[in-house]
Image: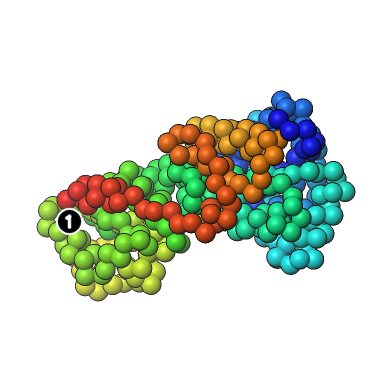
Amino acid sequence: MGSAIKKIGVFTSGGDSPGMNAAIRSVVRTCAYLKVDCVGIYRGYQGMIEGDFKPMDARSVNNIINKGGTILKSARCDDFRSAEGRKRAHEQLKKEGIDAFVVIGGDGSFTGAMIFNQEFDFPVIGIPGTIDNDIFGTTFTLGFDTALNTVVEAIDKIRDTASSHNRLFFVEVMGRDVGHIALNAGVGAGAEEILIPEENLGLDRLLESLKRSKKSGKSSSIVIVAEGDKTGKNVFQLKEYVEEHLPIYDVRVSVLGHMQRGGSPSCYDRVLASRMGVKAVESILEGKTNLMVGVSDNKLILTPINKAIKGHTKIDKELIRVSEIMTT
């Protein structure tokens, strides 16, 4: 382990995701274990600019591994987009004696960290925290597994109502650019159709699929729609289109929205967060920087932040094939 780093900052940025608190806990306790000071930076880059810091020790993170959200809060920060704002942030970090930081967030947060590293040669390591699972360089991001379980539980409950009233439900889930949540939750919940940005099903094919479902004897149907799906302009227009062309269906829409972000993290997310936090601190102390911790084949890996930002995750084609078979 290197000796140049004496104090590490940790903060969360962007949208919250289950597992962020577990990652904070891991970073803080790894610092304590390795005799390195740790400072919590509140409200992300905004708190960095304003010097909203608080020393943290192993006892500061008691009983947070099971909590959703983030105890360090998160906030958007337009000031950090400017050179002047980043200069003020750097001055605050040096004033506090912080030598490096761990950022837990998504691509926007990583972009800020990468630019900051380039401008000030400041050591940074990223931990991917986003429910969309849309960061290149890791099979899973923190919060994805929990969000899936939340969505599947909600769909199970919606199906009870759908079956009781012979209804068709369009259930919109998060995923503006990628369909990982929709595809996995759709297969896990037994949805009749899954609409994702990567695969434009088309309105005609959707109608044919719903007709087949009705003809096969299904009294109710669930269609999972990622918010970025291109089949219709939005889920409500899909509802109107189906009602117009298939009046036999009593159609309802359920938008799960921000409930997908909340809740106690799953065991998987807690364990992954703990592993990533340890790896992040150890990497900094080994002199590594401008990297993101990820997981591949259940092994922790490091990916350059610029690749994590610019790369694109790929939808699981095999899972798409499975979903097509299961909706027969």
Q: Position of residue 189 (x, y in %)?
A: 32, 45
Q: Is residue 315 visible?
A: yes
Q: Tell me, what colour scheme is on the image?
A: rainbow
Image quadrant where residue 79 sits? bottom right
Position of residue 262 in the picture relative to residue 233 (left or right): right
At a point 27% along the width and 56% down the height, the residue shown is 193
Position of residue 312 in the picture relative to residue 85 (left or right): left
Query: Which residue is disc 1 drawn over?
Result: 213
Q: Residues within 10 Å of mark 1 (few under 14, many from 20)?
A: some
At a point 34% along the width and 49% down the height, the residue shown is 316
Image quadrant where residue 78 sits? bottom right
Position of residue 115 in the picture relative to residue 248 (left or right): right
The residue lying toward the viewer, choosing from 231 and 109, is 109
The residue lying toward the viewer, choosing from 11 and 139, is 139
Q: Position of residue 141 (x, y in %)?
A: 51, 45
At a point 61% along the width and 46% down the height, the residue shown is 291
The residue lying toward the viewer, choosing from 112 and 179, is 112
Q: Position of residue 10 (x, y in %)?
A: 71, 43
The amino acid pointed to by label 1 is Ser
At a point 71% along the width and 30% down the height, the residue shown is 1
As drawn, which residue projects farthest toward the top? 33
Position of residue 253 in the picture relative to residue 9 (left or right): left
Mark 1 residue element: helix
Q: Position of residue 25 (x, y in %)?
A: 66, 34
Q: Is residue 24 visible?
A: no
Image quadrant where residue 285 sits? top right
